[in-house]
Image (spheres, rainbow, N blue to C red):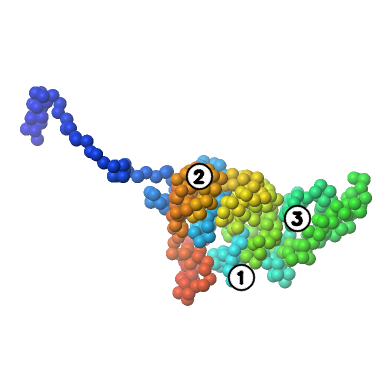
């Protein structure tokens, strides 16, 4: 080593500093890309629930709107999009199961889909020992579940707002001023006069048909005029009491609905998804929950709505939910809306209201869509071009996640315990039934559930 150092010193003295000269290398960009190590966008931190793996880097992908709210997220609400059969349902269910491991979490699901007479969430509810709240007009007539729009737990302002929404959804147009006054006067009279029980819709209908003089005399109009103003309103409400929608909303709220359970499932699978009943039902459930479920008790709540286009596509229902989202955000509410196509809502009658709700959703998850739909989604949501181009190529279980501008491609991972509970195909073999039973036992035995 000493001889080498001496030789280097002597050579430098004679010839100066000698550096190695390398010949240039000719190559292609395809070959040269190996020189630059792959990089991936930064993750969302390690607090929350694991979703799966980021496809390009292989890193674990962790997401929790409650942890990110106020730092990386301006709002905790979440929009899930994509064609059927690509993993939306499995993502929702595993997300809820994983959130429920935190003891300060509570989830309400509006389950609008189902098979064999039960909703999609029936397996998970059974595994957790929870009985879904099944809203069924036929069962309600024989003592089934009822929700009262005039429940005293709802403020009088909330009751009147809900009554207006029910009528406007059923009529397909806004309520005229005179009809609105007749409704307001009838509601005020019923609230003031019915004291020994819960007021019900029949009381409103009776008062609209036979208005009280005391409620209108200050306006200097005749009682029969007010009666004519409220006739159409009475006919619409009568549909909930004595028509095709009777049984669910025409009596006091059913006792025994446990609003303190970690998971509350409203099974709407017996309601025709294409009927006017669905948006009316969602409006009533939403307002009822706003006044009875959301409380300043430091719990983090998740309100997940399947087939959410019933909400976003109706101007009147969307307005109610806008208020719920703004109010609930201050009390730790994350609203999760699941829809198949964004065009179902942005091109509908409630385009303005839909746009407002979409802006509140700072998290967007997009599963595979056809190229034309992907381009439309990209324009509305402001997705980068590369994300729009890969959406049509996504395999089931892989989605583009946009969390307030942090865009990554994520593969959802489902555990062996979760698998039998999140796939809801009823055509199960005996082996699959046994596997599901084992999964339910494992889930019940795990801590935090």
Residue at horizontal 54%, vertical 48%? Answer: 377
Q: Residue at x 58, y 69 (%)?
A: 115
- What residue did someone put label 1 on? 117
Q: Residue furthest front?
A: 372
Instruction: Give me the C-alpha separation between circle 3 and circle 2.
Output: 37 Å
Q: Could you tell me residue 258's position as x and y percent?
A: 64, 61
From mark 1 to mark 2, how far is it between C-alphas? Answer: 39 Å
The residue at the point 65 percent across, 67 percent down is 270
Give the CA distance from mark 1 to mark 3.
30 Å
Q: Position of residue 381 (x, y in %)?
A: 54, 45
Q: Which residue is the site of mark 2? A: 383
Secondary-structure class at tag 2: loop
Under circle 1, the secondary element is loop
Q: Earlier in the sequence, mark 1 or mark 2?
A: 1
Q: Position of residue 437 (x, y in %)?
A: 49, 71
Q: Nearer the viewer, residue 296 or 18?
A: 18
State which mark lies toward you, 1 or 2.
Answer: 2
Badge 1: how crowded within 10 Å, few (<14), some, or many (20+)? few
Residue located beneath label 3 in the image: 171
Q: Could you tell which of marks 1 and 3 lies nearer the N-terminus?
A: 1
Asked whether the beta carbons under mark 3 and mark 2 sit within 8 Å of each other, the answer is no
Describe residue 355's horizontal placement relative to residue 141 as left or right: left
First in sequence: mark 3 or mark 2? 3
Left or right, 403 with reference to 173: left
């Amino acid at each position: 080593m000493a001889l080498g150092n001496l030789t280097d010193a002597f050579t430098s003295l004679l010839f100066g500093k000698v550096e190695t000269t390398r010949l240039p290398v000719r190559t292609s960009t395809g070959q040269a890309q190996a020189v630059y190590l792959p990089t991936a966008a930064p993750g969302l931190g390690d607090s929350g629930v694991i979703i799966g793996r980021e496809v390009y880097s292989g890193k674990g992908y962790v997401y929790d709107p409650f942890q990110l709210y106020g730092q990386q997220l301006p709002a905790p609400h979440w929009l899930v999009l994509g064609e059927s059969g690509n993993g939306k349902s499995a993502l929702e269910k595993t997300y809820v199961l994983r959130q429920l491991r935190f003891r300060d979490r509570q989830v309400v699901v509006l389950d609008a889909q189902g098979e064999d007479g039960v909703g999609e969430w029936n397996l998970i509810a059974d595994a957790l020992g929870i009985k879904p709240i099944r809203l069924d007009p036929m069962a309600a007539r024989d003592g089934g579940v009822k929700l009262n729009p005039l429940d005293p737990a709802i403020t009088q302002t909330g009751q009147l707002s809900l009554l207006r929404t029910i009528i406007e959804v059923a009529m397909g147009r806004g309520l005229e001023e005179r009809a609105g006054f007749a409704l307001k006067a009838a509601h005020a009279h019923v609230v003031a006069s019915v004291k020994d029980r819960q007021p019900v819709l029949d009381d409103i209908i009776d008062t609209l048909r036979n208005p009280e003089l005391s409620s209108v005399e200050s306006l200097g109009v005749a009682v029969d005029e007010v009666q004519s103003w409220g006739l159409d309103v009475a006919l619409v409400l009568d549909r909930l009491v004595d028509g095709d929608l009777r049984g669910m909303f025409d009596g006091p709220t059913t006792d025994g609905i446990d609003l303190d359970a970690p998971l509350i499932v409203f099974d709407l699978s017996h309601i025709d998804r294409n009927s006017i009943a669905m948006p009316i039902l969602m409006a009533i459930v939403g307002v009822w929950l706003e006044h009875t479920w959301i409380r300043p008790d430091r719990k983090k709540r998740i309100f997940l709505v399947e087939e959410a286009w019933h909400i976003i596509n109706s101007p009147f229902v969307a307005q109610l939910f806008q208020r719920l989202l703004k109010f609930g955000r201050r009390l730790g509410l994350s609203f999760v809306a699941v829809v198949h196509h964004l065009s179902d809502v942005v091109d509908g009658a409630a385009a303005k209201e839909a746009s407002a709700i979409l802006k509140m959703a700072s998290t967007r998850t997009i599963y595979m869509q056809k190229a034309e739909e992907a381009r439309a989604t990209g324009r509305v949501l402001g997705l980068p071009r590369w994300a729009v181009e890969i959406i049509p190529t996504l395999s089931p279980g892989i989605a583009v996640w946009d969390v307030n501008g942090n865009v990554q491609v994520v593969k959802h991972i489902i555990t062996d315990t979760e698998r039998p509970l999140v796939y809801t195909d009823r055509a199960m073999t005996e082996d699959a039934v046994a596997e599901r039973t084992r999964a339910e036992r494992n889930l019940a035995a795990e801590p935090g559930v």
